[in-house]
Amino acid sequence: MEQTVVKTESEELVDDSKGVILMNYNGPSTSVNQEMPSTSGIAIKQEIKEELNDSDNSINYDESGVKEESESSTDEEHDFDEAEQVKLKLEAKDEILLDQGLPSDIEEQALKAISDLLPEKSKSKYEIAYAKYEKWCTEKEIRSFANEKVLLSYFSSLSKVCKPSSLWAYYSMIRTMISIKHNADISKHTNLIAFLKRNHKGYRAKKSRVLTRMDVTKFLEEADNKQFLFMKVALIVGLAGACRREELTYLLLDNVKDEGTCFHFFLPNTKTKVPRDFFVTCGNIDGINMVEIIRSYIALRPNSIDHRRFFVQYKRGKCIRHPVGINTFGNLTKKIALYLKLDHSEEYTGHCLRRSSKSLLADSGADLLTVKSHRNSDVNTNDHAINVSSHSSLLASTSGIHLEHCKDCVINIYNK
C-alpha cells in the first residue's frame, strides 16, 4: 500500500532491518511516494536505544530521537565509546550497500582472495587466537573489536600469563584477523604498540644450546651404528644444511642424489619458500666417512615402502617402513646430549641443529659475511668469495657462497 509521506526538517531516515540512523534530512519539505514502513519512527528509535544502551542505560533518547548524555555516560567503567560504535555501524551499513551492487563473480573472487590471506600452515592458530579474543569481548559485552582501549585491556590481561614474545605473536595474529573480518587497521594504535614494546623491554629469549665440534666428533666416532645409525645420518644432514625439523621430516628420497664422492640434497619446500640444496662430502674425521654412513643407511631401506620419505625409522640394526616423525627430530639433539652426558640435556631443542651449524661454520674460520648469510638466503653474496681451509673445518656450510679451497668439508649452497 503506497501513501504520500511528507518529510520535515527534523525527520530522519532509518533502516528498519539494521536499526541504524542513516542520515538527517535537512532540506525543505517535499512530498514523495514510498511504501509505508511497517514500524513507526519512534518504535525504531526505541530499538536503536535498546541496542546501543548498556545495562546501566548510559544513553537516553528524547521523543525526537536526539541522543542525550546521562550522568553515567562519562563513567570510566565503560569499555568503549558508544559514539564510535554508531560510527562503525554506519560504515558497515555503507559497505553493505556498496557490496549489494557488486557482480557475483567479483564477490566470489574477493572472498577467495580474503580466504588466502592467512598462512596456510598456521591458519588454525590465527583462528584460535582471534576466537579467544572474540570470546573475551563477548564476556565483557563489548562489540567494538578494533577499539584501542579494548585491545589494551585484553593484552594487559594476557601479559600476566604470557611471555612478551608470545604477546607479539598474538598481536600479529589478531591484527590480521581484525583486518580481514572488520576491515580495520590496529597497527595505527600507537598506545598499544608502545605497551607491547615496554612490556618486551629487558626480556631475554630462551635459546637452545649448541653442539661443539668435539661433541659431534665424539658421537660419530663412539656411537654404535647398530643403535645410532639413523641419528648419525640425521645429525650429518641437519648440520650440513642447517635444516629445520620440518625440512628433515619431509625430505624425499627423490631429492637425495648419490654422486659417488658426495651426496647432493635438495630442499624444495622451506620455511622461507626459497628452495636450497647442499652437498655432503666425506669429511675430515679420521676413520669416519660421512658419505659411507649415509650410504649404509640408504642400503637398509626396505623395498616395500609405499612412501618416498627419506628418513625411515631405524630399530635394532634395521630400517622399517614407518617414516620418522617431526617430534623425533625435535628430540634428536637431546638424545645425543644424553648419550654424551652433557649438562642440561633438556636445553638441546629442535633448533639446536641450525644453531650448531652456524656455530661450527664460525669456528671453521669463516668471516662474518659467511656466518650472517648462512641461515639467510636473502643476503646477496654473489660478489664475494670466501676461503675456508679444509683442515680447520668439520662441517662447513654456506648460503649462496662458493668456498674455493674447502674440499674435505660439507658445503651447503642456497639457490637464488
Image: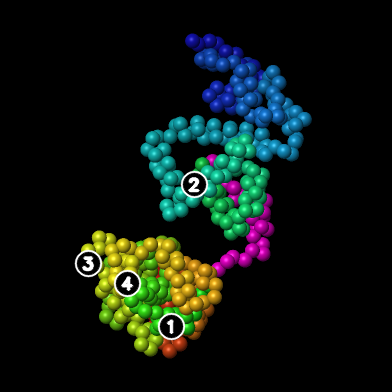
The magenta stretch is: 182-207
Helix, strand or loop under label 1: helix
Q: Mark 3 or mark 2, which is nearer the start of the sequence?
A: 2
Q: Nearer the viewer, mark 4 or mark 3?
A: 4
Q: Position of residue 96 (x, y in %)?
A: 50, 33
- Local crowd at mark 4 within 10 Å, few (<14), some, or many (≥20)? few
Q: Which residue is mark 3?
A: 303
Give the residue at x 63% y 17%.
42
- For marks 2 and 3, give the CA distance: 42 Å
Q: Position of residue 206 (x, y in %)?
A: 58, 66
The figure's colour scheme reads rainbow
Q: Quadrant of the C terminus?
A: bottom left
- For marks 2 and 4, give the CA distance: 43 Å
Q: Which residue is mark 2?
A: 127
Q: Mark 4 or mark 2, which is nearer the start of the sequence?
A: 2
Which quadrant of the figure has residue 143?
top right
Is residue 234 in view from this perspective?
yes
- Local crowd at mark 3 within 10 Å, few (<14), some, or many (≥20)? few
Q: Nearer the viewer, mark 2 or mark 4?
A: 4
**Magenta-span inclusion, residue 401:** no
Q: Mark 1 or mark 2, which is nearer the start of the sequence?
A: 2
Give the amino acid at mark 2. Glu
* Horizontal side, residue 282 vs residue 86: left or right: left
Residue at the far front in the pictured view? 316
Q: Which residue is mark 1?
A: 217
Q: Nearer the viewer, mark 2 or mark 1?
A: 1
Judging depth in this view, the residue of 105 and 7 nearest the camera is: 105
